[in-house]
Amino acid sequence: MNGIIRFIEKGKPFFNKMASNIYLQAIRDGFLTAMPAILFSSIFILLAALPEVFGFALPEGVSSWLWRVYNLSMGIVGILVAATTARSLAESLQRKMPNGYTINVLSVMLASITGFMMLAVTEIDGGISTTYLGTKGLLCSFIAAFITANMYKFCTLKNITIKMPEEVPGVIQNVFKNVFPFSFSVLICVVIDLISQQVFGITFAESMIALFSPLFQAADSYPGLMLVAGAMAFFWFLGIHGPSIVEPAVAAALYANVETNLRLYEAGEHANRALTIGMNNFVACLGGTGCTFVVCFLMVGLCKSKQLKAVGKAALIPCCFGVNEPLLFGAPIVLNPYFFVPFLLTPMINVVIFKLFVDVLMMNSFIYVMPWATPGPIGLFLGTGMAPLALVLGLVLIAVDVIIYLPFVKAYDAQLVAEEANKHEEIKDEEAIEEEVNTELKNIENGSLDVLVLCVGAGTSAMFANAVNKGAKEENLPINAKAEAFGAHTDILKNFQLVVLSPQVQSRYDEIKADADKLGIKVVKTKGAQYISLTKDPKGAANFVVKAANEE
């Protein structure tokens, strides 16, 4: 098994390169930025639909108003994602531009929205059709964003612009500077849609649905679901954030299928699309990638190793809310031969069981988008419309996951117990540690240190930032740490002197360092076990950021 792990690890540079692909990053960051609108709309759909589950009927006016809010927020997700994806991609392209060349990100967003409208909208009597402005138009969102950002890059590098006399104010010059890239971007989208209508007799948005429908149907099959779930776990086993690579490839289906399921449910039909964002969050990633919801309980209740008991206790609550990095790097599970089989197998078995419940027992699949941090069994129950079978499914998944993980956890526990019995580690004198810490901390007592901690979803980064702030408060030091999700940091980066990257975003180091170097900000990477241990050691976390800030 160790040989297999070493062989797989040799491919890590290639997988890291995949994770750092700017187009995959743009799609993922675009969705993260648009997520508040998606979750906002979900609140109203829950308020509108859940009373009916219990046999209550809301007044017609109230129900209509709730559905209106939902339709006018979720119904324009395609527009929002076109803008946010274009922004993310433009910012990535900007980092690679020569000095003196600047892409107007705001103009890129506006051009992407306009291009999206050209690709996705059809005219009807008295207005326009809104069919593809929501999740059905997400493929058009990505295409418009990619075309627009690259066209702005091309025009900027080639200096294709309207040149104005020097006497013209800068604001007016900027307006004319973006006329050509804006026009070219939108016109390309117009031509693409025109070709689609002439060749296929349908709009480009419709042709994209027809083209990718077989692919999405294949992804919704048993092998397809297993591939999606297994791939996310495989990448995370290498220490690379798996959803960052896998989810963008099927993002359009993940969200569009939820919308389709909801419409089927409203029509009294079976909501049978299994491949949804809810399935990813609460079935394939029950308790976090690798379905580690049960692992913490096994470690706390059954393990004899001090290490595993401590890790299990520390990771128990985070795992319940889908944040399992304390377990992945604390046990560790990442690149640990003992966990290779269960970590990959459990998600694949879970999605098969879920699809069996949907196909055979006719349980409705996910019809609502729930926040990803909702505890797994609760998210499964609410997301499927509080279906009674969802409660049974939750119990079945937990039982199956325990059966799969138990022998591997016990085997690893036995090894650690033996190692702990024979371990004679030299412990550094406590007074020496205290003196070293105090020496480092004094270096900033006359100033202040603002620290930004970044991870993928602002989960573990919040744990790390809280530890830093707690340690700073205990030592009465002017350190202020803030947690943020990668991709949402660009506007606030300038407010910090130090950036700490969690292990999940190591593949983004060059990207963030390029931005930070322009602002004279230091960036420091962390290792898995080190990062997790510091989240539980406030004084150590404070000392870590001080040392990092003082290093040359």
Image: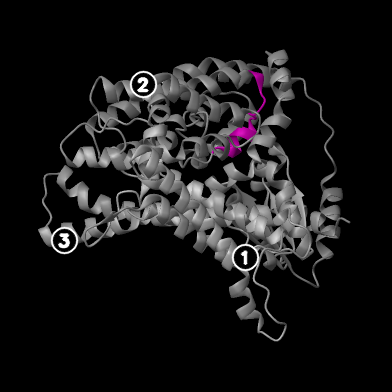
Q: Residue furthest bottom?
A: 167
Q: Quadrant of residue 325?
A: top right
Instruction: Judge the density around disc 2: few (<14), some (14-19), many (≥20) Cα neighbours within 10 Å.
Output: some
Instruction: Nearest to the eye among marks 1 and 2: give it.
Output: 1
For label 1, the SS is loop
Residue 453 coordinates in the image, percent (x, y): 65, 54
Q: Quadrant of residue 283?
A: top left
Tag of residue 104? 1
Instruction: Judge the density around disc 3: few (<14), some (14-19), many (≥20) Cα neighbours within 10 Å.
Output: few
- Residue 501 vertical placement versus 164 (above, below): above
Magenta-tinted stretch: 324-337
Asked whether residue 458 is in view, the answer is no
Indicate the amino acid at tag 2: Ile
Tag of residue 265? none
Instruction: Judge the density around disc 1: few (<14), some (14-19), many (≥20) Cα neighbours within 10 Å.
Output: some
Q: CA distance from mark 1 to mark 2?
A: 48 Å
Q: Earlier in the sequence, mark 3 or mark 1?
A: 3
Front-lying residue, 434 or 445: 445
Per the image, the residue denoted by label 3 is 62
Quarter of the image with the C terminus in it? bottom right
Indicate the amino acid at tag 1: Asn
Per the image, the residue denoted by label 2 is 353
Q: Earlier in the sequence, mark 1 or mark 2?
A: 1
The answer to the question of whether label 1 and label 2 lie on touching residues, with beta carbons closer than 8 A, is no
